[in-house]
Amino acid sequence: MELTCPAWLVAAPASGHGKTTVVAALARWHTRQGRRVRVFKCGPDFLDPQIHELASGAPCETIDFRMAGEEDARWRLARAARQADLILVEGVMGLHDGEPSAAELARRLHLPILLVIDASAMAGSFGAVAWGLKHYREGAPITHVLANRTGSAMHARLCRDTLPEDIAWAGHLPRDEAIALPERHLGLLPAAEIADLEARLERMAEAIGQTEAAELPPPVTFLPADTPSPLPPLLSGKTVAVARDAAFCFLYPANLETLHALGARTAFFSPLADAALPPCDAVWLPGGYPELHAAAIAANRPMAAALAAHVQAGKALLAECGGMIACAETLVDAAGRSWPMFGLLPGQACMQSRLAGLGVLEAELPEGRLTGHTFHYSTFETELPPLVFARKTRGAGGEAIYRRGRLTASYMHFYFPSNPAAVAALLGSMNG
């Protein structure tokens, strides 16, 4: 049975042109019209999806051929097509950047492209940029283009009049700081830190609602994909305590979905605010911004004791990136100040001014092969020998994965659907 649903892949010439703003604006606009919107993000990303989840009212899923495979993407899109009135996919970087690029993803998944161009410093070149992106290399299925950050209605008309006949005008968004999304070193601010985000989303929706882009795109046919076989209940009866607060907020919805499909119950807690762990069999400390909350972590000695007792009891703990930083003995922040952390791993983490790690990774663990990614601005100095090294799928380098008892730690953010059985072995009890 064919599945159809209106859909856009929203792309741009480069990062910073406003893809996230446009996707969030469209998601909120159509949600306000009573439509069910499902949003996807191309490539590993934890920050943009937080915005899209709030804008659409539904979790934002990941599409990444290298990390999860093409069939995973097709299955997730087909599942969304059964549920939604509109599917929005946000591209990554520039339209032709990366392997596979957003252009290639659009071709292989048969998604029409809504191109967003920051027009603030151009007029006559607007159409040339759109035409070039559409016809470069194997071409890209660009059907519409939207001008972002225009200075006036006249400026927008100048941009519109440069478009070739095979690219339709989708309107323009005027320059407006009230809808801009604030950023810092890892990208956008987390949604919880943007105090007026709800007001910004409403203003975005009002603005996009006045453009041609607000009309539903034509339906896209999604090829039926094989539904993954039900997972064996390898974590049945187990509870995984998941850290989730301002310091630990980098969570793939698919990872939580995988834990539940394995039979686990999840219990959320805050390493910043809570004095104790919830009753649990395993702990997952995902990434985030521990460096911005170092004082709170340093002050929460009851949580440090609770985590130490958990590990000493032989229970599993998985610490990813910021979670690993929090497990170190100390953290040296960007100002050179040293803060005590939870002290579960020997060594110290040191914040850097430049990017220290980036890329999609594969790791061959004793429990099995897992994929994921790394993106961090710190280094970890330890005498603890690595268990294994996760290798980049493109280029040289990778990340060490450490193990101390049942504690597994790395800068790698694991993508649980890549090997649910390995995740169950990582988080399950020693005797199963």
Image (cartoon, rainbow, N blue to C red):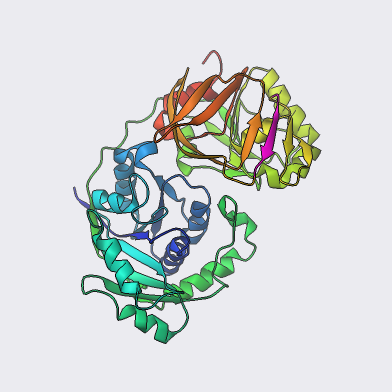
In this view, 156 is above or below 404: below
Q: Is residue 232 left or right of residue 349?
A: left
Q: Is residue 156 left or right of residue 316?
A: left
Q: Residue furthest top?
A: 431
The percent coordinates of residue 346 (x first, y second) are: 70, 24
Q: Residue furthest bottom?
A: 154
Towards the viewer: 201 or 161: 161
Q: Is residue 349 left or right of residue 107?
A: right
Q: How many marks?
A: 0
The percent coordinates of residue 138 (x first, y second) are: 22, 53
Towards the viewer: 373 or 25: 373
In this view, 198 is above or below 40: below
In this view, 300 is above or below 208: above
User: Does the magenta run of residues contain 347?
Assistant: yes
Residue 235 showing in the rendered view: no
The percent coordinates of residue 85 (x first, y second) are: 33, 60
The percent coordinates of residue 360 (x first, y second) are: 44, 37
User: Does the magenta run of residues contain 391?
Assistant: no
Residue 252 showing in the rendered view: yes
Residue located at (33% from left, 64% from top): 114
- The segment highlighted magenta reads 346-352
